[in-house]
Image (cartoon, helix red, strand yellow):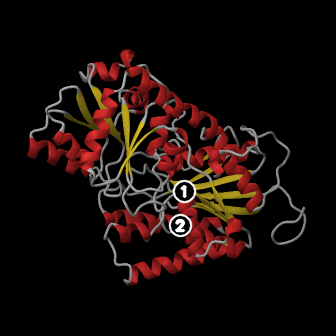
Amino acid sequence: MATSHGGTRQARTILLLTQTFPPDPAAVGQHFGDVARELAHRGHGVVVLTSERGYDDPAVRYRSREVTEDGVVIRRLSLASLGKASMGKRILASALFMLQCLWVGVRVPALGGVLFSTAPPLVGVVGALIGMLRRVPVGYWAMDLNPDQLIVLGKIRKQGIVARVLELLNRFVLARAALVVALDPLMADRLHHRGAHRGEIRVIPPWSPDKSLDHVPRHANEFRLRHGFGEALVVMYSGNHSPSNPLTTLLEAAVRLRAEPALRFVFVGGGTGKREVEQYVADHSLTNVVSLSYQPRESLSASLAAADVHVVSLGNRMAGIIHPSKVYGAMAVARPILYFGPSPSHVTQLIDEHDLGWSVPHGDVEGAVATIRRIAAMSEHERENVGARARAVLQRHLAAPTLCARFCDAIEEGLPLARSGREPAYPTATAPSLASS
């Protein structure tokens, strides 16, 4: 078996570059943790370069060097996370992290390949440089796309110098990537037009990093009881409130429906977009809206399952730029989906193919009101049937073992890497599924 540079393929080390890694709870790091563990189980040497401090809370410190029971070697770098209090600190921490990755990465012995994502956004440049200097293939896991997102949000100008520099760096990375993993087909199209070869792109949706999510029956849900939702229909948005996931149409619908006591609109989480929720509550004296902070991981199942329908939102120009991962949490707890955003998208594909919920365009307040009233008019049994279909689709096509195995298959084929003969933790994903559509 030949490597990409000739010669006999031997099991070698793969280097993972990620600013977050377990036990840090950030989702990107949790995904990398699953991949690292699976690659190690398959017999590959795995070295992870990550931050010594917590991503959200830099006061949290982790061991600087560690070898897990699976054999994953973790090296945590100092001054690689300074918190999210200011953009300046985030940029400085990202730069320090990438410089250290370059210094350490070029010295990793028996290196066979490099895998990186978009945390921090320009770490791919470092990964590509390590690949060039060590003459090994690199893999790019595209979690989101920039400068695309910054341009859509109006943070930078499309023809400005910052956007042009970022675009050049993206093309540099893609030109050197032997494997590119996109989260959905629309993202894959954008990456192809940016310079990635079709043969090097794999479409693999992300899996829910929280394996403990489960269905909690409505009548036995302590979260509903604690917050006094009673028999009201709970329409919930849970997660980061961001301009990339606008909620204005939903909030306008809440204003129109404020005289209907059987409805509750619950917003769980934080982020810059949470100010809009609180402003609507204050300006319209809304008593049908409940705003809550992020919930502890141990109560996440009960929190998510307290909803009767989950809201997933995607900005009109964000399809293919960011991936609406909130949909998986809703599906895991067997709840229908109320989607606000453009079509086509990954969520509309799921809804249309499997009848998992409803879609409303941004700005269609009348449509939102009518849809919510239609959901409220359904029997609890009817809503539960929709949620059960959603959970079944997740378990059949989008479960963590299936997608993580498919991802590691892609790494082994795309970089390529030889196995040592050890059995994988998850079975090899060979059957066609929604994940590759």
Secondary-structure class at tag 2:
helix
Q: Residue at x 35, y 30 (%)?
A: 307
Q: Amino acid at mark 2?
A: Val
Q: Is residue 114 visible?
A: yes
Residue 384 location in percent, x, y?
A: 45, 25
Image quadrant assignment for residue 256: top left
Mark positioned earlier in the residue sequence (1 or 2): 1
Image quadrant assignment for residue 2: bottom right
Q: Amino acid at mark 1?
A: Thr
Dot 2: few (<14), some (14–19), or many (≥20) neighbours within 10 Å? many
Residue 31 location in percent, x, y?
A: 56, 47
Image quadrant assignment for residue 151: bottom left
Q: CA distance from mark 1 to mark 2?
A: 8 Å
> Between 83 and 260, which is closer to the camera in this rendering?
260
Q: Relative to residue 101, is residue 310 depicted above or below?
A: above
Residue 18's disc number: 1
Q: Residue at x 69, y 40 (%)?
A: 70
Q: Is residue 109 visible?
A: no
Residue 224's disc number: none
Check if mark 1's residue and mark 2's residue have beta carbons within 8 Å.
Answer: yes
Which residue is tagged 2? Answer: 123
From the viewer's perspective, is 393 left or right of 429?
left
> Between 391 and 29, which is closer to the camera in this rendering?
391
Q: Residue at x 65, y 38 (%)?
A: 401
Q: Residue at x 34, y 32 (%)?
A: 375
From the viewer's perspective, is 227 left or right of 433?
left
